[in-house]
């Protein structure tokens, strides 16, 4: 079977892999592996982003004292990740497919160099027929160093590897137009660009998940804006992956329509780098208007009213409007000391070139 995609990222949520009692659902895992193997053999490069370390570790350990949430996460993920990857390794081996473990942290995406190192690692795995299985390194990522959840990580991975599609598998058929448990609500099948879904999303999460539907929606929107199709579907359904690719019209899911124009690799990195911003550029109203126009415009010192924070050349900075609301992120071309000297002046070179500017 020839598929429409040649490279996809598949994110598997904790709730897909965990049973109600928290133990690992090996039957479900095995069924998903069979489908990934089928796609792999048909020539589709698949990168898996798999949650489930904490959920699989929890049932392995009896603790002698009450643990706080950081202790629990570190202990359970250390044990659970070993168990999880071991299962994947064995299940894929039955298909004669090699897998490799990539454990990462938010910080590893912070500089362009680290970002490119990670990209290279996964590219070389794919080139050699190895399926990367990615997860956050929960043992060392705590509090502000954490990704919001693996939905955020999967968006970064899909964008970094220029995947054509990101498939987010959760324990629900897609985004409902109301509370999923309420009668009369149904799955939104297609989300056009710019459509606001905030009224539909509840803050409730499923048993073992971290971020909930809100982060899925935010990430899906951002990734689709980069030209990547994003699909949210139910990983508990039999044959979901193969059905999504073989019978897209007949398989229930929420699909985010991708932007028609591709975004450059460096802009994709910048789009996902907000968490690493070292400072802020506050713009005047005319500069904001120019940026929002149709033409590609760089940020010149004359349009900047205030600079916050200390940063070096090439760091990421937030771009704020006159009311202090963030409108984008960019890679700065000079240090904060030099930028302050140029502030408000005419005839100077751009502080952020439009090639390195991402507007929300
Ligand atoms: N409008 C909505 N449509 C679908 N699910 C929603 C909606 N609002 C909130 N949710 C909740 O989001 C959950 C999925 O997110 P999450 O718990 O993070 O799962 P995962 O572990 O797969 O990442 C669903 O089980 C559901 O309870
Ligand atoms: N890295 C964690 C996953 C945390 C997470 O984001 O979970 P989920 O919301 O189910 O994707 C783990 O493996 O347990």
Image (cartoon, helix red, strand yellow):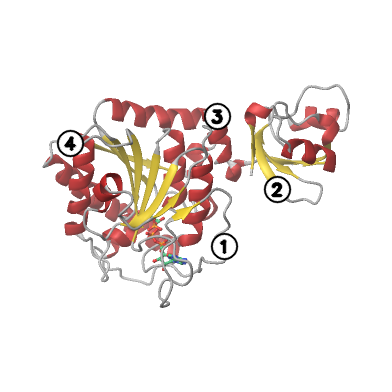
The Cα–Cα distance between marks 2 and 3, rounded to whole angstroms, is 20 Å
Q: Measured from the top left, where is residue 314 in percent x and y?
A: 64, 28
Counting residues from the start of the chain, the first of labels 1 and 3 encountered is 1
Instruction: Please name the residue shown 58% across and 57% down the image.
Output: 196
Are circles 2 and 1 on residues that touch, CB within 8 Å? no
Counting residues from the start of the chain, the first of labels 1 and 4 encountered is 4
Q: Nearer the viewer, mark 1 or mark 3?
A: 1
Q: Measured from the top left, where is residue 262 in percent x and y?
A: 51, 32
Pick the quarter of the image with the N terminus: top left
Label 4 sits on residue: 97
Counting residues from the start of the chain, the first of labels 2 and 3 encountered is 3
Instruction: Please name the residue shown 78% across and 36% down the image.
Output: 290
Instruction: Report the disc number at residue 198.
Output: 1
Instruction: Please name the residue shown 25% across and 26% down the image.
Output: 128
Instruction: Identify the image quadrant of residue 36.
Output: top left
Are circles 1 and 4 on residues that touch, CB within 8 Å? no
Label 3 sits on residue: 266
Instruction: Please name the residue shown 73% across and 51% down the image.
Output: 325
How many numbered tags mark residues here? 4
């Amino acid at each position: 079977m020839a598929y429409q995609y040649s490279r996809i990222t598949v994110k598997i949520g904790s709730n897909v892999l965990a049973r109600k009692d928290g133990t690992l659902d090996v039957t479900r895992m095995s069924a998903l592996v069979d489908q990934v193997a089928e796609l792999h053999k048909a020539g589709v490069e698949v990168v898996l982003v798999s949650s489930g370390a904490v959920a699989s570790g929890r049932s392995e350990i009896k603790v002698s004292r009450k643990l706080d949430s950081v202790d629990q996460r570190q202990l359970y993920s250390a044990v659970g990740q070993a168990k999880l990857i071991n299962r994947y390794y064995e299940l894929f081996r039955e298909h004669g497919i090699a897998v490799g473990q990539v454990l990462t942290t938010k910080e590893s995406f912070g500089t362009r160099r680290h970002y490119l190192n990670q990209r290279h690692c996964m590219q070389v795995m794919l080139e050699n027929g190895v399926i990367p299985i990615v997860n956050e390194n929960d043992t060392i990522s705590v509090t502000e160093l954490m990704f919001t959840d693996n939905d955020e990580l999967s968006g970064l991975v899909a964008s970094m590897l220029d995947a054509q599609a990101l498939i987010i598998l959760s324990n629900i058929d897609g985004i409902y137009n109301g509370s999923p448990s309420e009668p009369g609500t149904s799955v939104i099948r297609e989300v056009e660009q710019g459509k606001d879904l905030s009224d539909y999303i509840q803050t409730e999460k499923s048993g073992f998940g971290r971020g909930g539907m809100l982060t899925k929606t935010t990430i899906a929107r951002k990734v689709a804006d980069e030209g990547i199709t994003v699909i949210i579907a139910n990983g508990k359904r039999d044959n979901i992956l193969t059905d999504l690719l073989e019978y897209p019209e007949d398989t229930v899911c929420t699909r985010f329509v991708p932007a028609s124009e591709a975004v450059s690799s460096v802009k994709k990195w910048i789009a996902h780098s907000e968490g690493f911003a070292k400072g802020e550029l506050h713009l005047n109203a005319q500069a904001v208007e120019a940026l929002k126009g149709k033409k590609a415009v760089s940020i010149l010192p004359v349009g900047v009213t205030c600079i916050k924070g200390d940063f070096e050349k090439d760091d990421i900075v937030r771009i704020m409007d006159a009311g202090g609301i963030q409108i984008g992120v960019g890679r700065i071309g000079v240090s904060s000391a030099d930028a302050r000297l140029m502030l408000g002046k005419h005839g100077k070179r751009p502080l952020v070139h439009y090639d390195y500017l991402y507007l929300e």
